[in-house]
Amino acid sequence: MEEEVLRIAGLHVSVDGTEIIKGLDLSISIGEIHVIMGRNGAGKSTLANVIMGHPAYEITSGTIHYRGQPLEELEVFERARAGMFLSFQYPLVIPGVQVGTFLRKSVQAVRGEKAPTAREFRKELKTHMEAMGMERSFLARYVNDGFSGGEKKRLEMLQMLLLTPQLALLDETDSGLDIDALKVVATGINSIAPEAGCLLITHYQRMLEHVKPDYVHVMIDGCIVKTGGAELAGELEERGYEWLETAG
Amino acid sequence: MNWKKEAMNGWKPRGEVMVGDTARDAVGDYQYGFHDPENATIRFDKGLSEQVVRDISELKGEPEWMCELRVKAYKRFVEMPMPTWGNCDILEQIDFDSVIYFLRSSEGTEKDWDDVPEDIKNTFERLGIPEAEQKWLGGVTAQYESEAVYHSIRSDLEEQGVIFLDMDSGLKQHPEIVKKWFGSVVPHSDNKFSALNTAVWSGGSFIYVPKGVHVEMPVQAYFRINAKNMGQFERTLIIADEGSSIQYVEGCTAPTYSTESLHSAVVELIAMDGAKIRYSTVQNWSANVYNLVTKRGIAHKDATIEWVDGNIGSKLTMKYPSVILKGEGSHAEVISVAYAGGSQHQDTGAKVHHLAPNTTSNILSKSISKNGGRSSYRGMIQVSPKAHDCRSKVVCDALLLDPDSQSDTYPTMEVGNSSADLEHEASVSKVSGDQLFYLMSRGHNEAEAMAMIVNGFFEPFTRELPMEYAVELNRLLELEMEGAIG
Ligand SMILES: Nc1ncnc2c1ncn2[C@@H]1O[C@H](COP(=O)(O)OP(=O)(O)OP(=O)(O)O)[C@@H](O)[C@H]1O
Ligand SMILES: [Mg+2]
């Protein structure tokens, strides 16, 4: 039985008066992995940010529902608490805030009453960090401060695993990762996938050797122009996007 | 103590991660806004005159020389003009005639906590003072209004000859030491407020650390203004003899009244050859306190003086901890944070006078302004002509939380020797919308996200504090953020 977590209908989004998403429909159910591919500037990150509630983007028409609830009713932090998670394409530096403190507070905020005790939390943290091949010394560093590209992506993954989302939006989490890290990220996605809907934004097929998508969508100029199965990703890698661009 | 190097290297972590729960028990916006009924045993009328000054001295049974010094200082105070820097508009609002200059609320200074009057004890217990003593302190003084009500020192320190007393007892028991050093670092004629303090001082701490003695656990003083219109004028003198070291921590609060209070302290530090003094302060005044404090230390050969100074609240704070590097190879460290909320002005900074060769100084000043608050950095680095090969680094970072708030810097450098190596960096930043979005996407509401950013910004300061103070400061800032965001 499929349970829909995300439904987007007729979505138009503008930033500073410029339309970026120009009529988009998408439905994601629990247990499904969706992939969005598309050129730089097509509006992929914009879509992810809008779903999460970034205030810079204005929804000019259309709707987004999360588990049947219209998202406009929820503030960003409420969306997170309701089980939505965004892995950022460019994670932000928070100077002076230690990773350990940040993770503990985030887990408390998001998981609320169901948050683990301090001891359980430490255990969970240890398990995930070992699985991801992260040194303990990570915890004492400041959030994303001086992190390499790959380290930032690992931290995003670690957050996803700790926050146990029902909808995970991963914006180019596979970019800039070495082969080992890529596998680690894939393992992370596969571990939450059965109980969550996943939307992966990526430029590369290589991720899809480890994660089996149910749908691949091609986004061009703010619209989904084609949807297919895993084989579409391979085709895109070979042929590029030009053949999908219809005149007009 | 390897603080020197670390402190200026930017964002270096404390090393340990705190995993656990920090308790929360808010008492409104200003956490220490409660007050107790005043049960004064002696209370002076409002206003200041030569007679008031003489009365304070007589009441305390002071030696003649101290009484004369007070009177001389009073006369200077009357003559001297207000400072022309800081915030002249706010300074002009001070009504010296409406201040109560002395208030005694207890018959004496108790050594046993149980003997402290009940209401005063309650106050300090609400502030967490006696528990802290048991856990992590080498000694404690608790001052309520004008005088110390409780005082204790660990017996092992006493056996090593360490003197830790409230200033009044210090003068009684060690008049010769006090006479030698009192006013030697901050003369009464230094500025209008040091003159005022010298005239009406009461309470504060007196510390002498003998040669070669290292006081490992910090000693603490806690100052509390409870009465309306009260002026608190504590006077602290710390002498670390050759090769000794001590860490002193003070905290201050006052309840919220509709009338104003004046806090005008003087602190003098003397670090003899090879000695080290660290003086840490966390002040959290309510928004109607004028906080005008003169803090200065003299560092002799190879000595180190460190000021760790945190200023939250008050209507106007003017405070520039300074160090006179008198001996060759001496070192000064000033690390300060200021938080200015709505209609508050934090005018803080640091001054270092490099008088001897091979002296070094580091200044790190961080400020946050919010809801139209204003923080100013006012600093001075002076290198005398004889002082060759001196190094100084000044870093000022300001964070503005909204467009109505303000930050400005007034650095001054007077360099008389061309071999000096001086650096000055200043930055003003704003909280970015993307940072807030990132934190909020991790389940933190706007106030929590803001508090996290603010606490992170102050972290280079906070990690220098004893853990209890660090936790407390973070909690205060969280409350500040909650109070202002709807
Ligand atoms: N906050 C913003 N302000 C102004 N323009 C924006 C903003 N966010 C996105 N845009 C513009 O919208 C368009 C789509 O950007 P978006 O980041 O969504 O692309 P993308 O598909 O994620 O590209 P990439 O593959 O490079 O990550 C771009 O032209 C970008 O410049
Ligand atoms: Mg993008």
Image: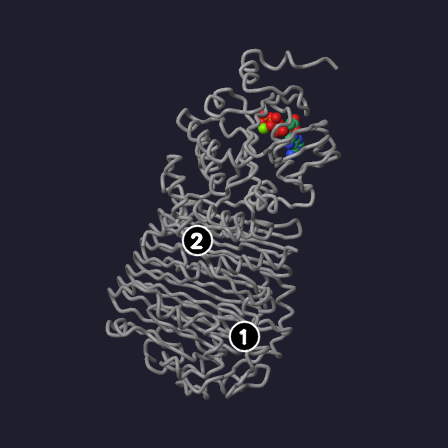
Q: Residue B461 at what x, y percent from top left?
A: 45, 54
B181 left or right, relative to B397:
left
Any mark on residue B77, and which? Answer: 1
Residue at image position (41%, 68%) is B268
Please give the chain letter of the residue carrying mark 1. B
- Mark 2 Cα-neighbour bin, 10 Å: few <14, some 14–19, many ≥20: few
Q: CA distance from mark 1 to mark 2?
A: 59 Å
Query: Dot 2 corresponds to which residue?
Result: A117
Distance from mark 1 CB to nearest ligand 1 atom below 8 Å = no
| Dots 1, 2 in contact, CB < 8 A | no
A239 left or right, relative to B70:
right
Q: Which picture quadrant has residue B442? A: top right
Badge nearest the viewer, 1 or 2: 2
Report the quarter where the C terminus of chain B lies. Answer: bottom right
Please give the chain letter of the residue carrying mark 2. A
Answer whether residue B178 is visible to the viewer in this image: no
- The one nearer the camera, B361 or B6, is B6
Q: Residue B154 at what x, y percent from top left?
A: 30, 73
- The one nearer the camera, B42 or B235, is B42
Q: Residue A81 at what x, y percent from top left?
A: 57, 46
Ligand 1 shows up in which quadrant of the image?
top right
Distance from mark 2 CB to nearest ligand 2 atom below 8 Å = no
Kind of residue sitting beneath label 1: Phe
Answer whether residue B139 is visible to the viewer in this image: yes
B357, above or below B264, in the image: above
B53, above or below B327, in the image: below
